[in-house]
Amino acid sequence: MATTFQVSTTPEGVLRVAIEGDLDSGTTRELRDQLQALLTRKPRLLEVDLSKLHTIDSSGVGMLVSLYKGARSHGGELTITGLRDQPLAIVRLLKLDRALLGTT
């Protein structure tokens, strides 16, 4: 399955990225630069919708953490929504759910 992403902006000015497919070493190389380029817009809030993400590996987690740090470095915030199944289990296993999902 090909990994794709769509970018939109809500009426409130939230930059929303919806990723579908898999975030692994093959796909993150292709997506990383494009997603990092979104940070040049310096969004106040970057929302990453992963409700259609099937699997994630360490390179995908690394890309999400990099986006999180990039958003914070510009004074913005990053939130992840829709995380479920294997990707949610990985984020919880790595104890990143508090930072990335805003949960305790």
Image (tube, rainbow, N blue to C red):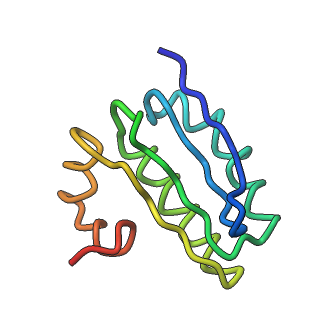
Where does residue 79 sit, x and y in percent of width and height? 48, 66
Where does residue 15 sit, x and y in percent of width and height? 68, 60
Q: Is residue 11 left or right of residue 91?
A: right
Which residue is at the front of the view, 12 or 87? 12
Q: Quadrant of residue 50?
A: top left
Image height of 3 relative to 65, above or below: above
Image height of 52 relative to 62, above or below: above
What residue is shown at x 56% (from left), y 72% (from top)? 69
Q: Residue furthest front?
A: 11
Image height of 82 relative to 42, above or below: above
Q: Is residue 15 left or right of residue 52?
A: right
Q: Residue furthest top?
A: 1
Q: Residue furthest right?
A: 41
Which quadrant of the rendered structure holds the C terminus?
bottom left
Total labels drawn: 0
What residue is shown at x 61% (from left), y 64% (from top)? 46
What residue is shown at x 55% (from left), y 38% (from top)? 28
Where does residue 51 sit, x and y in percent of width and height? 39, 41
Which residue is at the front of the view, 15 or 63? 15
Q: Is residue 42 left or right of residue 26?
A: right
